[in-house]
Amino acid sequence: MPRTGRLTTATAVLAVISALATACTGQGADTASDDPKADVTLNFWHGWSAPSEVKAIEENIARFEKAHPNIKVRVTGDMTDDKVNQALRAGGDKAPDVVSSFTTDSVGKFCNSRAFADLNPFLTKSGVDKTKVFPKTLLEYTQFEGNQCTLPLLHDAYGLVYNKTAFAAAGITEPPKTWSQFTEVAQKLTKPKGDSYEQVGLMPTFHGYETKPMRLAAQWSPTYFTADGRSGLAVDPAFVKMLTAQKDLVAKLGGYEKLERFRNTFGDEWSAEHPFHTGQVAMQIDGEWRAPMAKEAGVAFEIGTAPMPVPDEQADDYGKGYLSGTIMGIAAGSKKQNAAWELVKYMTTDTEAVVAFANAIHNVPSTFAALQSPALQVTPEFKTFLDIARHPKSSTTPAKADGGTYQLTFTDFAYAVEKGDVGDIPAGLAKTDQQIDTDIAKAK
Amino acid sequence: MTGAHPLRAKRRRSALRTAAFLSPWLIGFAVFFLYPLLSTLYFSFTRYDGFRQPAFNGLDNWSYVFTDYPLFWPAMRNTLWLVLVMVTCRVAFGLGIGLLITKIKTGTGIFRTLFYLPYLAPPVAATLAFVFLLNPGTGPANTLLDAVGLPTPGWFTDADWSKPALTALALWGVGDLMVIFMAALLDVPKEQYEAAELDGAGAWARFRHITLPNISPIIMFAVVTGVIQAMQYYAQPLVAGKVAAGVIGGSGQQFEPGYPDKSTLTLPQLVYNLGFQRFDYGTACVVALVLFALSMAFTALLMRRRGGLIGAGE
């Protein structure tokens, strides 16, 4: 074979390999051209797994299919972000067209990598003004640098769930509003038993289920990043104050080691043996789901809910809290994006659908209209969380290119602080900032 | 000149025949080893998130892993600890149990079954059971230690004890090695022991000069497979860390493996964490290559030792 012929063959083979490799990345077109009125079947992946939640989502999908007879939805539940990531990358007929995820921390990664389609053109095409439909905080954690690659599908507000019966027994008449009251109440509710406890007022360590550094920090209204986009943990005094206050609470309730040893006797967070249900902790930092879960577990005590306490110097802001939630997006590689948008639009913006779903799984609705809807079932315990969700100073953690890695880095530092391994918190935060900046620069 | 052509043709036919016989292995080697290895090497010099096209970024990933990635060195130390300590303990314990069972006269079947059964337990279930047994507050292990006045470790919640706890889990599942060692021990010619006894050799001398040389290839096999297992150690430390940290799933926050204090973090966990959770395939490839180099280094070292051991046996 002449040399030029070999070269031509080699070039052709390389071209075919390149084309195949490009196809394998699952990269989609920039605009959707499919007909949303055509008969189509969508693959929808979500993370819910509890029977009541699965039933709720199936009912929601059934309502959608009734309203859109040309669109069938094939639902797959119990999906994690790892599986979603791999399926989106692989592409093909079995890959999801529509995805919902509990991990708002992943939004930055999904948007930055263009794994999900930007929903802004779809919103514009449908005449939906997102700022009039969704609260500002929810729009913050569902977009990244202007790319609205997901929309909120219900959300979670974090507050305090407490054992009213234990409060009465300790002579406490109302939930604590400031951090000093909180510390005092937590100590009053703590009953030692030998080297351990019969009951702690609160499990304050950062492995205590929902007691994450970010949830507590929200009460100090922190700013995670400076105006130029750099990590600002050492710049905003909120973080030093929060970490110092938490470390002080850990010390006052018996110290890190003793508390951690007690924490290891706790049951699973999502089972009936949760320590709040069993009376091992009297106050729990948690989402709106905890009170109904405790009732379903058949607890013998009365349950109260309240916003998380605020630092003493911010007493006027009492009522605020940390917000997070479920997100929903369209796979960038989907060939049925217009039909997929119909499903996303229905599930995230249709008031009836949002309210019905919120009622079924006891989550906070994610649209202004649903939050005001008379059809929303509001128990006194749930109302606390609705109020936290509506509070103007409630906040979330921003989406970043590295997803939630910056939060994990901060959390790692918080573990070291509560354990007593950090002498100089501001210096440690400055070092943490450097690490976060390096990680984000790497991810961008 | 005329005789050279048929010879060349014969050689070519012979080469083709050899290639044909080798082709299944060559194809497997190229598809499942060479291509992935070269791809991994290529991706390690790129910024690649699995969605967009890889973009060449030189030595960025390599320098990030060795200088800026805070999880790499703890994972490296843990993996080396597991390779050295866990493998040594497993081989020594498996050999010890094998020796004991070959010596006892009655109930051998019962003991064999008792020691072998744990090996059949799925790794995740076995780990869950160990986290329960070693629960520092309510576990039976600490209740027992406390009853006899001994200190009660935090096991999977204490960074100093988490790897020993994982080693205990590995020893519990040592049934596979026990069976292999038993087979080897029973194969040692009895005449050699009889001759040694006549020469006045004690138990240690018999073990040192007869048993060990005879079973050295099996010890080498146990060490090599043990090193490979330790290099791939993923599920047990992840499950133990998650359960002990109280993270079963649910609220949607990411979980970083390694609880407590990164003491159970391993290199294979980093590969998964970087590639599939941080969408950073380029950096994941660097860690994978480090793991590969480490495996090669250990294998080379063991192969050099192997010569001496087998030589002693022969």
Image (cartoon, coloured by chain):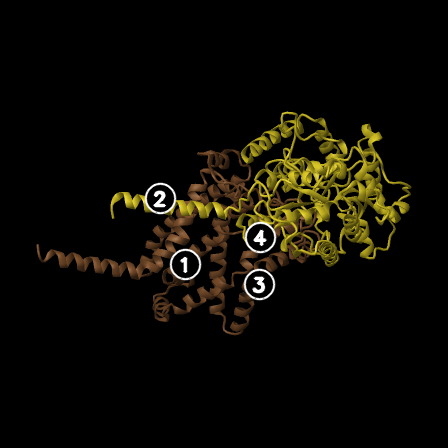
Chain colours: A yellow, B brown
Task: Please tell me how crowded label 1 is: few (under 14), some (14-19), or many (20+) other residues with Cα within 10 Å.
Answer: some
Q: Which mark is residue A11?
A: 2
Q: Nearer the viewer, residue A269 or B204?
A: A269
Q: Nearer the viewer, mark 4 or mark 2?
A: 2
Chain letter for mark 2, please.
Answer: A
Q: Nearer the viewer, mark 3 or mark 1?
A: 3
Q: Nearer the viewer, residue A422 or B160?
A: A422
Q: Quadrant of residue A410?
A: top right
The amino acid at mark 4 is: Ala
Q: Nearer the viewer, mark 4 or mark 1?
A: 4
Task: Please tell me how crowded label 3 is: few (under 14), some (14-19), or many (20+) other residues with Cα within 10 Å.
Answer: few
**Residue depicted at 45% across the width and 41% down the height:** B43
Q: In what element is the residue under mark 3? A: loop
Q: Nearer the viewer, mark 3 or mark 2?
A: 2
Q: CA distance from mark 3 to mark 2?
A: 53 Å
Q: Is residue B212 visible?
A: no
Q: CA distance from mark 1 to mark 2?
A: 47 Å
